[in-house]
Amino acid sequence: KRKFVCIAKGKIVCIAKGMIVCIAKGKIVCIAKRKFVCIAEGKIVCIAKGMIVCIAEGKIACIAEGKIVCIAKGKIVCIAKGEIVCIAELMKSAFV
């Protein structure tokens, strides 16, 4: 249970259990298990396995393999190769 806590220039950095957590300017940044997680302005951004996942305002957006996938208000929207594909209420039963 070795923790390393550094308070510098208004930043709090904690290294514990292989995680690096930085609290700075109201942002919480966590680097854990090769994931980069940033909580800022009510948004949670996770960069893991080449994916960028943003959870903001109840929306989940995932940028992976050049595709942008947004899950919002029960709709799944995929923007890929310049096309916008929306999977909404018609397909709802497929996800049950």
Image (cartoon, rainbow, N blue to C red):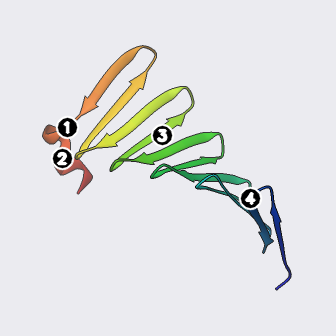
Task: State the CA–CA distance, disc 2 to disc 3.
Answer: 19 Å
The picture places residue 47, in percent across and down from the top left corner, at 62, 46
Q: Which residue is mark 1?
A: 88
Q: Which residue is mark 2?
A: 92
- Indicate left or right for 83 with 53 as reference: left
Q: Earlier in the sequence, mark 2 or mark 4?
A: 4
Task: State the CA–CA distance, disc 4 to disc 1.
Answer: 43 Å
Q: Which residue is mark 3?
A: 62
Task: State the CA–CA distance, disc 4 to disc 3.
Answer: 29 Å
- Give the label, 2 or 3, closer to the camera: 3
Vertical arrangement, residue 78 with respect to residue 1, above or below: above
The picture places residue 33, in percent across and down from the top left corner, at 73, 61
From this viewpoint, which residue is outermost toward the bottom?
Answer: 1
Q: Earlier in the sequence, mark 1 or mark 3?
A: 3
Q: Secondary structure at mark 3?
A: strand
Circle 2: is it few (<14), some (14-19), or many (20+) Cα within 10 Å?
few
- Give the label, 4 or 3, closer to the camera: 4
The picture places residue 91, in percent across and down from the top left corner, at 19, 41
- Please name the residue shown 57% across and 40% down the image: 52
Q: Earlier in the sequence, mark 2 or mark 3?
A: 3
Task: State the CA–CA distance, disc 2 to disc 4.
Answer: 45 Å
